[in-house]
């Protein structure tokens, strides 16, 4: 507790951190359609945290409620959009995703294991990378932009197929150096405020930063519908935003750095249920 408070005092001056009472109900449980999602678990032994907590637990009751019912969840507008895209023929193949993949349920489990090693490329790929590869390689279509409506919607639809599954990424073998790189980035101070991800999301989760309740910065709910964005946003957009907030020059979406960070964060969130598409403020 002492180190947390000292850090809090130092950071408080820079970014306005306070140990305040938040309006979130931290004991609430996320149950969707009768299925209880894991939003809190004891961390494994080699983990830097004692417990692993979903960002959902840190949101206020109104925002939490939006994720409990799929009819209220604004992310589902995009899921529906992607259901149409799934059936739409495109590119030189003249085929739709459905023509080759059948039901989208066939991609269940994929989100939970992202990013995943690609043997041919010799690097880990995010869900966006896999989708664009298949669009180009199989469908003969143009790749989608990272933050395009199409890509966000498709990652939401594919992610939804893994909802309730435990996040479990491979960090062994050729993935190991990527994990190490992500870890290094997570703990490296950057920007004019000279802060690392860890300062906020490991040392101060549970505290208030201005009007926001700091979470562990988990990625199990992505793409998320953010009320502030009035739309879906990708994992890499959130990374970029957090880096900009500490006045650092952010890496690009899809960069090796962000893929490594994504892998490391997925590892930190192991065991949490995939919540895609989640709702955040
Ligand atoms: C012409 C057939 C074809 C079309 C059209 C196609 N795919 Fe694929 N896709 C494949 C094949 C073949 C693979 C590699 C084998 C596999 O994983 O099923 C693949 C792999 C993938 C993977 C990686 C799966 C994994 O388990 O690693 C994703 C994600 C994917 N496709 C998404 C899409 C999406 C989204 C669309 C539509 C925008 C699409 N694909 C259109 C044939 C196609
Ligand atoms: C100055 C404090 C601060 C720093 C440093 C910071 N963030 Fe954040 N981050 C926030 C705040 C505030 C939010 C929104 C509330 C929340 O979920 O914690 C947030 C949210 C997030 C989320 C979304 C969590 C969810 O459940 O939707 C992710 C992911 C994230 N941050 C990752 C990072 C990464 C990666 C870094 C380092 C590159 C970083 N953050 C650095 C303050 C910070």
Image (tube, rainbow, N blue to C red):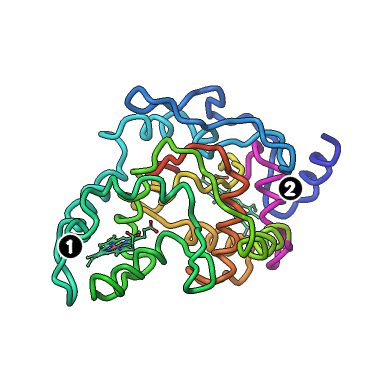
Q: Is residue 210 above or below residue 93?
A: above
Q: Which residue is mark 1?
A: 96
Choose top left, top right, bottom left or bottom right for residue 9. top right
Tell me if 217 is positioned left or right of 226 in this view: right
Please state which of residues 22 and 148 is positioned toward the viewer in this rendering: 148
Q: Is residue 62 above or below residue 221?
A: above
Q: Which residue is mark 2?
A: 12
The residue at the point 62 percent across, 46 percent down is 268
Element under label 1?
loop
The residue at the point 71 percent across, 42 percent down is 47
Is residue 199 in the magenta section? Answer: yes
Quarter of the figure that contains the C terminus: top left
Element under label 2?
helix
Front of the two marks 1 and 2:
1
The residue at the point 54 percent across, 29 percent down is 23
**Disc with the residue nearer the chain's start (1 vs 2):** 2
Asked whether mark 1 lies closer than 8 Å to ligand 1, one says yes
Numbered label tally: 2
Tell me if 106 is positioned left or right of 1 in this view: left
x, y percent for residue 275:
43, 40
x, y percent for residue 25:
53, 25
The magenta span reads: 188-211
The secondary structure that most of the magenta stretch takes on is loop
**Alpha-carbon distance for marks 1 and 2?**
52 Å
Task: Tell me, for residue 204, which label it has, or none.
Answer: none
Please state which of residues 202 and 179 is positioned toward the viewer in this rendering: 179
The residue at the point 53 percent across, 39 percent down is 55
Please state which of residues 143 and 122 is positioned toward the viewer in this rendering: 122
x, y percent for residue 69:
32, 30
x, y percent for residue 213:
58, 39
Query: Badge 1 local density, few (<14 within 10 Å), some, or many (20+)?
Result: some
Is residue 156 in the magenta section? Answer: no
């Amino acid at each position: 507790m002492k180190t947390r408070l000292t850090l809090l005092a130092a950071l408080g001056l820079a970014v306005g951190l306070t140990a305040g009472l938040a309006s979130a109900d931290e004991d609430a449980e996320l149950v969707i359609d009768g299925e209880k999602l894991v939003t809190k678990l004891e961390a494994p032994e080699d983990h830097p945290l004692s417990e692993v907590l979903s960002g959902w637990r840190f949101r206020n009751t109104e925002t939490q409620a939006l994720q409990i019912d799929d009819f209220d969840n604004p992310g589902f507008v995009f899921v529906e959009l992607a259901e149409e895209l799934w059936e739409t023929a495109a590119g030189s193949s003249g085929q739709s995703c459905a023509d080759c993949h059948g039901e989208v349920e066939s991609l269940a489990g994929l989100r939970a294991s992202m990013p995943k090693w690609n043997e041919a490329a010799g690097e880990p790929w995010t869900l966006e990378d896999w989708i664009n590869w298949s669009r180009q390689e199989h469908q003969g279509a143009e790749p989608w932009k990272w933050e395009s409506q199409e890509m966000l919607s498709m990652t939401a639809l594919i992610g939804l197929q893994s909802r309730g599954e435990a996040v479990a990424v491979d960090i062994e073998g050729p993935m190991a150096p990527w994990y190490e790189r992500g870890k290094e980035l997570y703990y490296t101070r950057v920007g004019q405020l000279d802060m690392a991800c860890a300062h906020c999301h490991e040392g101060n989760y549970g505290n208030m930063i201005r009007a926001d309740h700091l979470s562990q910065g988990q990625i199990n709910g992505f793409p998320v519908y953010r009320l502030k964005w009035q739309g879906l946003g990708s994992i890499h957009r959130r990374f970029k935003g957090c880096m900009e907030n500490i006045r650092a020059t952010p890496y690009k979406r899809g960069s090796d750095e962000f893929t490594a960070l994504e892998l490391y964060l997925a590892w930190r969130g192991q065991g949490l249920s995939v919540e895609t598409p989640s709702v955040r403020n």
